[in-house]
Image (cartoon, rainbow, N blue to C red):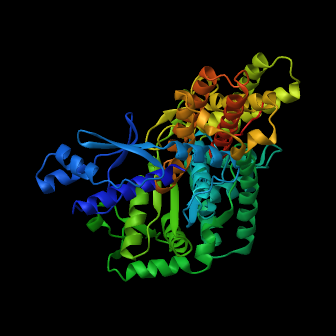
Amino acid sequence: MFLDFMSEVEGLLTAALDRCGLKVDEGVNHLALEFSPHADIASSVSFRLAPLLKKSPALIAKEIYQALPKERRHVDRAELVGPYINFFMSCSFLHMVLEQALADDCWTGRQRQNVIVEHTSANPDGPLHVGHIRNSVIGDTLVRILRRAGCTVDAQYYVNDMGRQEAMVVVGCDHFQLDGSKADHAIAKVYIAANKLMEESDEAKARIKAEADLVIRRYEAGDPQIEAKIKSAIRYAIGGIEETLHRMNIRHDSYHWESEFVRSGSVAEIVGDLEKTGLTEWEDGAYQLDLSAHGFEKKMVLRRADGTSLYITRDLAYHKWKAANSDRAVDILGADHKLVSGQLRAALRLLNIREPEVVIFEFVSLPTGSMSTRRGKFISADELLDQVEKQAFEEVSVRRPDESEDFRRDVARQVAVGAVRYDVVKVSADKATTFDWRQALDFEKLSAPFIQYSLARACSILRKGEETEATREAKHLDPGLLTGENEVALLKKIAEFDMVIDRAARELKPHQLATYARELAEAFNLFYRYSPVLDAPEDLRSARLALVRAAGNALRVTLETLGIPALETM
């Protein structure tokens, strides 16, 4: 929708520039199109041409404006305001927006790429904690956005099965019994207990460390007994982690284990390829790669003294595989991975392997402070979800006291999921954030419940309106009646959906869709407040009911793309 309007604006400007004999170097947004409070879209391309032509931007803009073609479909008019050229949507375009928004299958974009998105990938040594949630929510939301944009996406979980944490899980299982608690929590208990054993004495520390080192060596060597132990423990832990993820509407399509790249010879192959660069050497008992020419003072360790590989070595092999099996590979990583991620990309450049696109996120925190799985001081995602769901139940019970407990608990569960997901993703990934359940559950403020309630309100209006087939199909309507300020603003906001999806998919910025969801809900609520629907004259009533249905469709698809339950009643 909006992309069609923008495409026509680009065509008009390109034609005008050609007529004037002017040329702008092509690139991202080379025509300098931008949103403006004074137009549906504006161009400031004159500023880019001014230094080359040595003329004022206003004079250049006037020349371009006068050369704009008169034949237009989606553009109603263009206006010259100093150095800016403003463009406005035509009524026929807004009618097309309404017609398309009434069709439930019009929300798939035009990008056609195979994309791998790796997210979460938490060590299977315990439950997800609050620190993991932002990774999972950002990753899953990007998966949904990319699919909505038209891409084929494989959401992957990279299983760390060869690290010291997993060796300590095996040691813990050898010394302690798993209890009957949720699988990932049970694994955490033996992992924490094994680490506490190391604190009893120097002798205990040396003994437990030796046990873990032996597990690492035997597993990398392919010892079947150790392999069975590690895989059993990891699968058990991941089963519990999946329960938490599914509770948040998050699912992975495939799991890839570190060990598969060791067993296949891919790790040995990539180490051999790096050796050919002449930048590797044994130093301080480890095989290292010198990346100083790429701005890294610290060398990348590829192998330990005993010959075993490290996480980053195996990660290089994994990324080589991802580059060969996708058009785009996306990694979601915490800020503490900046250095390692930078080294990994530099090493891939040395080998002429396509680098991943990396989304680095700052951490989400709670007022309670930092979290550590090893010491057992963490707030699990399960505990957070339980607490938010409890508070949501109290809020829903106040609002809907006459409903059954089953109804209130079901709504509370879905409101809690939406509250957590939206509060996490609404902030740009590069900014730290603190989760406050009070704000996240505020039905009156700009939160997930506010957006969910906007959809529920639209559905309620439609139920009361007793729609007929005539009001569901644009061909039976007179969209020309929708000329009020808030009606037009809502149509324009609905039109923006495809553009927001396209941009968020290209730029990997899911918070843009969260912002759009809030703005769409606001636009719908302003329309509802100032434009009576059910009490309007018959023709206008039908047109406004159609607009309510269109807005409801847009809200529903937006919420689904954010991974937030789209509730028709709450």
Vertical placement of 280 versus 471: above or below? below
Count of marks, rendered view: 0
Residue at x-position 52% and y-position 42%: 91
Task: Report x, y in % for residue 393.
Answer: 76, 24
Q: Going by the image, does 317 lie left or right of 72?
A: right
Q: Going by the image, does 486 lie left or right of 362?
A: right
Q: Which image quadrant is residue 283 in? A: bottom left
Vertical placement of 267 versus 105: above or below? below
Q: Relative to the observer, which residue lies in front, 354 or 547?
A: 547
Residue at x-position 39% and y-position 33%: 37
Vertical placement of 121 versus 450: above or below? below
Residue 423 at least partly seen:
no
Task: Report x, y in % for residue 396.
Answer: 76, 22
Q: Relative to the observer, which residue lies in front, 494 or 242?
A: 494
Residue 267 at least partly seen:
yes
Residue at x-position 49% and y-position 37%: 427
Vertical placement of 186 versus 167: above or below? above
The quarter in which the C terminus is drawn is top right
Task: Report x, y in % for residue 19.
Answer: 26, 61
